[in-house]
Image (spheres, rainbow, N blue to C red):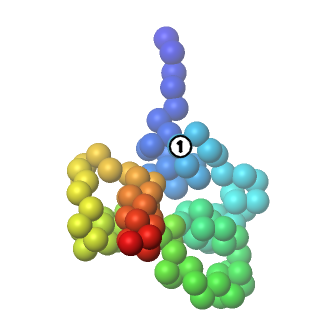
Amino acid sequence: MSLSIDWGNLVTQGRAKAVGIPWSDEEQKALKDGMTPEEVRAGILSKSEKEKRQDIKKSLLYLKKDELMDLAVKENIEFDKDAVTRDSLITAIEAKRAREKEE
């Protein structure tokens, strides 16, 4: 019997950084110290660092999946709400914004 890791489930639960990428030791410590997975994914590993980073609220990496879905709807990005991932939403929003900047 072959066992495979359900990376999507681990990422959704905050138990992995991304598909195929586990948390580093430093990131695991930050999570244990009370940082959220979204903050750690954005590179914020301490509460003092979070206070210094005013731009984090603007970062797509900080947003939860439901907030990203709301933003995608506002930006007229089509997606399947049952199948889409946080990473896919972030990629789609960033790509759309990049295209609009070029115009």
Residue at x-position 43% and y-position 61%: 95
x then y, percent, for residue 59:
51, 75
Tell whether 76 sits left or right of 91: left
Please tell me how many numbered marks the rendered image carries: 1
Q: Vertical placement of 86 versus 22: above or below? A: below
Residue 39 visible:
yes
Q: What element carries label 1?
A: loop
Residue reaching furthest right?
26
How would you rate the neighbour count of disc 1 (Cα within 10 Å): few for under 14, some for 14-19, many for 20 or more?
some
Give the amino acid type for the residue marked by disc 1 in the picture: Val
Judging depth in this view, the residue of 40 and 98 nearest the camera is 98
Residue 63 visible:
no
Tell whether 47 sits left or right of 70: right
x then y, percent, for residue 81:
24, 54
Residue reaching furthest top?
1
Q: Vertical placement of 91 versus 62: above or below? A: above
**Residue annotated with mark 1:** 19
Tell whether 70 sits left or right of 4: left
Quarter of image, res 68: bottom left
Q: Vertical placement of 102 versus 79: above or below? A: below
Residue at x-position 32% and y-position 50%: 84
Quarter of image, res 30: bottom right
x then y, percent, for residue 4:
51, 26
Residue at x-position 71% and y-position 81%: 49
Q: Quadrant of the C terminus?
A: bottom left
x then y, percent, for residue 12:
44, 52
